[in-house]
């Protein structure tokens, strides 16, 4: 059954060259590499509209449309020379959820009944109606585990292009040197890329209504827990790196970068929250401001994805109270240690703890000051290795340096606040612009901090402090600059040279 479905996907002859994988426009030197589950339905319809002047009569059936033009093998040099040859990559987590809800769980006309039967009978997915969030989460764990085996060649089934790695598709056209766009930024990135050769690109994008938007009977963000996110990022590690790099590159483009910020309904309040820097508090505060009541599961507010976010450009929302928060790097490190690594709570990172226990003599039952110091040194060694082998923005946000946040928000008008003085400083910069702010602060549940067997200052030996400083020297400089600025002026300082030695 599953093989018959795959054979249906293989009816077309495989293109013989990288160029032949590209779609092209008749009216301009514009070329596009389509990748399944990464906006290809919209983009194919857009190409059809641009060349024909009207929408395709059956937009959701655009795939395989013979009137879509394909580049020829001899076009390779022309594609390389074009400034308008591109592909679109999608956040791996969003793409995975789209495959699950769009192609496997639902029973719509664009779903695959053979796939549903296979994953029910052979993988154990429960595709019954009225499945709750926990049931969908269990399905997603089973599905990504099977994808991992399938992509590694350890199943009898061929890889389907709907869950094939985006990076593999891009590898086939590496020689063409394509521009990489992101699906979540497509609305503003594509006009910037193509407007000089397609002056009507914005009007055409607005006119094309066909989009393969997967229906989900539950909040998709609520299905994702930390373990599922870790699995998806591991299975699609190369896709994650490509997506994050493309996101950073577009954010650096002068005047075109956009910033995702927390929002509280229509209130003029926005912030960028950094993990282990009051992130749980901030998300619960923003939820209360928007909904007028506390979230029912405050410690799960990250995984449940219930806090609103918006994207702003430089100079946008000039009257808004915009801020980010910085924390003493030593305190942030020990929060990471107790909450995520040594702690055993539902929000902990057990896969890291296991790795440390297997490779770095980490004691998961440490009960003495000496054992905790050994654990802390093991964690620092692990982080040092990550810092050496990964670019800063590819690091896990729970231990990524805070200066990376400062760099990201540069030019967007966000001011720095201290975590230990967050409430009075936020009230000061807000003034009377955010009604109900002080009352909302009083409603925020207690901190999610894990219990600490020993205070950080007791564990903090000179050797440990030195190693923390070696990793987070720039964060220490940033924190001291913000702390000194508030102490001297009673107001948020204007940051200078926060890039430090990086």
Image: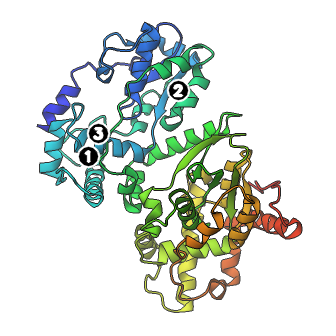
Q: Dot 2: what SS?
A: loop
Quarter-wise, where is residue 210 in the image? Answer: top left
Residue that carries the numbered disc 2 in the rendered image: 178
Residue that carries the numbered disc 1 in the rendered image: 150
Residue that carries the numbered disc 3 in the rendered image: 102
Q: Nearer the viewer, residue 445 or 160?
A: 445
Earlier in the chain: of badge 1 and badge 2, it is: 1
Q: Is 205 rendered above or below residue 451?
A: above
Q: Nearer the viewer, residue 327 or 307?
A: 307
Q: Dot 1: what SS?
A: helix
Mark 1: few/some/many CA within 10 Å (<14, 14-19, 20+): some
Quarter-wise, where is residue 5 in the image? Answer: top left
Query: Residue 468, can we see it?
Result: no
Residue that appears at 55% across and 71% down: 443
Mark 3: few/some/many CA within 10 Å (<14, 14-19, 20+): many
Circles 3 and 2 in contact, beta carbons < 8 Å:
no
Residue 51: x and y, percent?
Answer: 45, 9
Quarter holding the N terminus is: top left
Residue 128: x and y, percent?
Answer: 16, 51
Q: Is 106 rendered above or below residue 174?
A: below
Residue 371: x and y, percent?
Answer: 52, 87
Q: Dot 3: what SS?
A: helix
Q: CA distance from mark 1 to mark 3?
A: 19 Å
Residue that appears at 46% across and 65% down: 295
Quarter holding the C terminus is: bottom right
């Amino acid at each position: 059954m599953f093989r018959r479905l795959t054979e249906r996907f293989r009816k077309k002859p495989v293109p013989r060259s990288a160029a032949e994988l590209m779609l092209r426009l008749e009216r301009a030197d514009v070329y596009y590499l389509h990748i399944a589950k990464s906006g290809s339905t919209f983009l194919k319809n857009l190409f059809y509209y641009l060349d024909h002047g009207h929408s395709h009569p059956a937009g959701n059936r655009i795939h395989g449309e013979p009137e879509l033009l394909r580049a020829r093998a001899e076009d390779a040099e022309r594609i390389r020379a074009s400034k308008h040859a591109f592909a679109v990559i999608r956040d791996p987590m969003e793409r995975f959820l789209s495959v699950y809800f769009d192609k496997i769980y639902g029973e719509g006309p664009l779903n695959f009944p053979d796939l549903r039967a296979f994953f029910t009978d052979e993988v154990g997915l429960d595709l019954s109606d009225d499945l709750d969030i926990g049931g969908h989460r269990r399905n997603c764990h089973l599905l990504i585990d099977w994808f991992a085996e399938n992509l590694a060649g350890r199943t009898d089934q061929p890889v389907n292009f709907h869950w094939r790695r985006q990076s593999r598709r891009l590898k086939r056209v590496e020689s063409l040197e394509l521009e990489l766009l992101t699906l979540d930024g497509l609305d503003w990135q594509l006009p910037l890329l193509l407007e000089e050769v397609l002056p009507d690109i914005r009007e055409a994008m607005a006119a094309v209504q066909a989009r393969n938007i997967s229906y989900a009977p539950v909040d998709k963000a609520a299905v994702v827990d930390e373990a599922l996110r870790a699995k998806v990022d591991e299975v699609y590690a190369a896709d994650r790196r490509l997506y994050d790099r493309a996101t950073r590159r577009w954010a650096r483009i002068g005047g075109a970068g956009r910033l995702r910020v927390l929002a509280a309904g229509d209130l003029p309040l926005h912030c960028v929250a950094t993990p282990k820097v009051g992130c749980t508090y901030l998300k619960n505060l923003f939820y209360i401001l928007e909904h007028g009541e506390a979230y029912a599961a405050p410690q799960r507010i990250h995984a449940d994805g219930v806090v609103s976010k918006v994207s702003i450009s430089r100079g946008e929302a000039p009257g808004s109270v915009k801020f980010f928060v910085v924390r003493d790097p030593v305190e942030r490190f020990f929060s990471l240690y107790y909450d995520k690594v040594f702690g055993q709570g539902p929000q902990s990172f057990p896969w890291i703890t296991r790795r440390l226990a297997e490779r770095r003599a980490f004691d998961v039952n440490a009960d003495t000051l000496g054992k905790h110091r050994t654990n802390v040194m093991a964690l620092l060694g692990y982080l040092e290795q990550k810092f050496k082998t990964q670019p800063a923005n590819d690091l896990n946000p729970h231990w990524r340096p805070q200066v990376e946040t400062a760099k990201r928000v540069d030019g967007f008008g966000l001011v720095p606040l201290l975590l230990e003085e967050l409430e009075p400083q936020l009230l000061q910069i807000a003034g009377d612009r955010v009604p109900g702010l002080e009352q909302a602060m009083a409603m925020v549940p207690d901190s999610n901090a894990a219990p600490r067997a020993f205070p950080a200052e007791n564990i903090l030996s000179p050797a440990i402090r030195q190693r923390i400083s070696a990793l987070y020297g720039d964060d220490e400089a940033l924190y001291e600059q913000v702390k000194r600025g508030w102490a001297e002026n009673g107001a948020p300082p204007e940051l200078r040279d926060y890039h430090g030695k990086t």
